[in-house]
Image (cartoon, grey):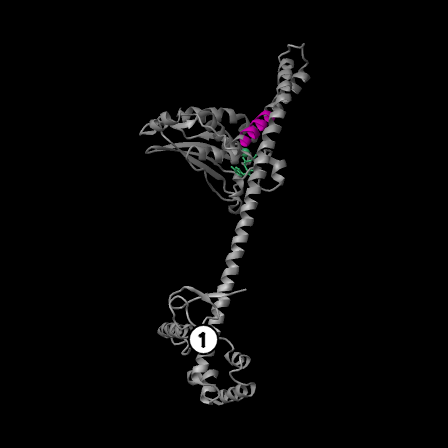
Amino acid sequence: MSRSVNCPNCLAAIPADAAACPTCGADIQLMLLVADGRLLDQMRAHGAQAPVSAEQLVPRLGDYLVEQGYVTTEQLQTALAAQARSPGGSARRLIGQTLVALGFIAPASLDEAIARQLLALQTALLEANHTLEQRVAERTAELESALARLTEINQLKANFVANISHELRTPLTHIKGYSALLADATLGPLTGQQQEALTITATAIGRLESLINDLISYAAASRGELNLNLRPVSLAMVALQVLQHSQAKANRQQVHLSHTLTPDLPPVIADEEKLYWTLLQLTDNAIKFTPSGGRVVIGAVAEADIVHITVQDSGIGIPAANLDGIFEPFQQLDSSSTRRYGGTGLGLALVQRIVEAHGSRIEVATAEGQGSLFSFSLPCYGAGAELRVSARG
Ligand SMILES: Nc1ncnc2c1ncn2[C@@H]1O[C@H](COP(=O)(O)OP(=O)(O)O)[C@@H](O)[C@H]1O
Ligand SMILES: [Mg+2]
């Protein structure tokens, strides 16, 4: 392999063994010594510990001099013994200087040997850098292909979820239709027990339906099909609907559900249906993860052109280490919670996508055992926001 280094004078690439630079004609060894001299000056300027000779920049100079035939092993031994006898500290002679003092090597030859060794070191460093660059490029290519594969898998997953949930919806429509016919006695009179069974069935169908709808929305969102129908929306109305819908669950859990909405709350710019769904998910979580006797409060405060929306609970809270994970699809904290609390782990993943599609961010303030506060902001209708609505809608 032909190695190349750079000329210390003009920085052009030169063969590693070149005596002179083909570009600027500089004597390489001389240039290296000059460069060394500058380096040494700088090092001296930066403290007492700095080397005082180019010799100190090269490792195991004695062995190198023997290897290269500048001195014999015996001469080196003699010089080492002389060095050991010489005074210690900063006054101590280096091995090269000792060899010169003993007349075993001419000063010019020592300089030449040091320059050669420096050149070899520089070449090795350049090669190491080159290898490192190659490895970085290889790793980058590997990461890129892993990322492409991951994107592909994610796409497959989203397609699978979309297909399976559409397939589930069809039979569910039949189950729902026929149980409704049964429940309203269209297909004949019912006993009290049968009616009770159908009520329970209707609840289960409702849960299954909303689960399937969540899966469909999730699949659509992961394929980038989250379309917003932005309009002026009465946040107070939406929040009251959420409160109404969630009241039964709160009662069952013996959680106190309330709001701090004021009548003067301005309308916000949002997709009404998705805003409703978002607030419902946050409220559903808040109730679900709050033990009986606890509180859940939906709040909204207008500030300048923005409305801050909050859902606060006094529940189990979320350990700081798990905060990032809760927005990942299918993520639920601790596996046993699946059985204890139910759910798919899709709610917050979708909430985050919806809130971000509105140009906002979902934030969480929480601590384990201290409850949680989920919040996000939406622009008020007015103060220029109409422009955005008409532009998008
Ligand atoms: N208000 C909350 N209090 C405590 N933990 C919560 C709260 N909201 C969400 N979490 C945690 O985040 C996880 C993900 O929430 P989510 O995506 O809505 O899924 P799911 O409700 O189906 O479990 C939950 O399983 C729970 O561990
Ligand atoms: Mg949820």
User: Is residue 263 magenta-colored?
Assistant: no
Describe residue 170's horizontal placement relative to residue 86 as left or right.
Answer: right
Q: Quadrant of ligand 2?
A: top right
Tag 1: amino acid: Ala
* Residue at point 59%, 27% (across, down): 212
Q: What residue is pinned by disc 1?
A: 115
Q: Is residue 212 magenta?
A: yes
Is residue 254 something that shows in the picture? no
The residue sitting at 57% across, 33% down in the picture is: 158
Q: Is residue 138 above or below residue 204?
A: below
Q: Residue furthest left?
A: 383
Q: Is residue 340 visible?
A: yes
Residue 295 position, x and y percent, is 49, 34
Relative vertical location of residue 289 with respect to residue 70 in this rendering, above or below: above
**Quarter that holds the C terminus:** top left
Where residue 390 appears, x then y in whole percent? 36, 25
Q: Quadrant of the N terminus?
A: bottom right
> Which residue is nearer to you in this view: 392 or 95?
95
- Nearest the viewer among 289 and 1 is 1
Residue 182 figure quarter: top right
> Which secondary structure dominates the residues rendered in magenta?
helix
Q: Nearer the viewer, residue 27 or 307?
A: 27
Q: Residues within 10 Å of mark 1 (few under 14, many from 20)?
A: many
- Taking 30 as reference, is 281 above or below it? above
Image x and y of residue 199, in percent: 62, 20
In the image: residue 173, left or right of residue 285: right
Start and end of the magenta stretch?
Answer: 207-219
